[in-house]
Amino acid sequence: MDQHAAPSRVNSDLQLRMKVAACTLILVREKIMGYSGHVSIRLPGREAFLIQPIDVPRSGLRPGDLLVCDYDGKVLEGPEGQRPPAEVSLHGEILRARADVNSVAHFHHDLTNSFTLVEDVPLKVVKNHAIRWKSGIPVHPDPAHVANGELGRAVVKTLGEHYALQIRAHGQVICAESVEAVLNDSIHFVENAQAMYHAAVLGKLKPLSDEDIASFEKYFQRGRHINKLWDFYLDGARTDGTVPKDWEI
């Protein structure tokens, strides 16, 4: 365990619900998530996860709206009559396959996805916090909605041991150890794509080298950085009313 890591944060079921809702609201606020997309979190001790229903707007999501689904996408608990999102299998199959992943975000950021639409210009690591994806950012070739288990397992195969992928002409999938971490990584993933796009306008790109990555990693404390970023964006969202101030997260 990293001796410099921030203390872990205890999560009750209600706190997990609040965090998923807050993460979703913040991603909408930051114009990363739009009218579609979803965040999930594995429920400790259960082969199940929290995810939002298909018919609740992302911009108004509340903790009580969330559904409990199993890895097959079956609703186990939740408001009567509510259905999971069409791509619930994307979350379920990743959580089933990857014990190191507890939270998944899927969204559709157009500029970021533009790197899947051109020849020979893959998204690379150009910003320091993007070293999270030093192992690579695969592109899933099938742009279809991940609407069943078979399609979900295909995404898992493309993902491999990586922590993010792009679905060609579709969107992004971010995998992390917690809701706080998935917010952190979603923001940095988009920032990295935006930086690469703008740098390419200026001249020849210089992605981070192995030496650059090793130098940054030497002193980087992921746990502390995740908590710092979570607190920053949560405070801003509370201040402008995006996230209710009485949510204890």
Image (cartoon, helix red, strand yellow):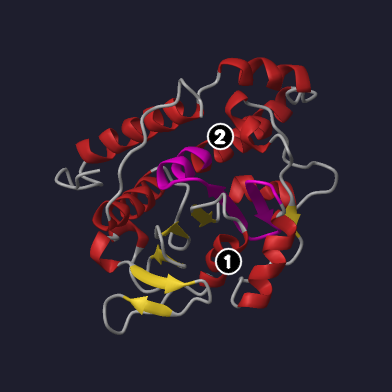
Between residues 202 and 130, which one lies in front from this camera angle?
Answer: 130
Tell which tag, 2 or 1, sits nearer the viewer: 1
- Report whether 187 appears left or right of 60: right
Quadrant of the image containing the C terminus: top left
- Report whether 18 appears left or right of 71: left
Query: Label 1 amino acid?
Result: Leu
Residue under the image location 46 percent in, 53 percent down: 33
- Which numbered dot is residue 188? none
Q: Residue furthest bottom?
A: 81
Residue 133 in which image quadrant: top right
Please give the residue where the numbered disc 1 appears in the rendered image.
90
Total marks placed: 2
Q: Position of residue 229 (x, y in %)?
A: 40, 31
Q: Is residue 99 magenta?
A: no
Please give the residue where the numbered disc 2 appears in the rendered image.
191
Secondary structure category for the residue under label 1: helix
- Report whether 133 appears left or right of 99: right
Q: Position of residue 209 (x, y in %)?
A: 77, 22
Residue under the image location 62 percent in, 30 percent down: 195
Nearer the N terminus, badge 2 or badge 1? 1
Query: Label 2 amino acid?
Result: Glu
Residue 26 in which image quadrant: top left
Q: Position of residue 127 (x, y in %)?
A: 63, 26
Number of other residues with Cα within 10 Å of mark 2, as a class: few under 14, some 14 to 19, many 20 or more: some
Q: Are marks 2 and 1 in contact (CB under 8 Å)?
A: no
Between residues 191 and 211, which one lies in front from this camera angle?
Answer: 211
Magenta highlight range: 161-185
Q: Residue furthest left?
A: 246
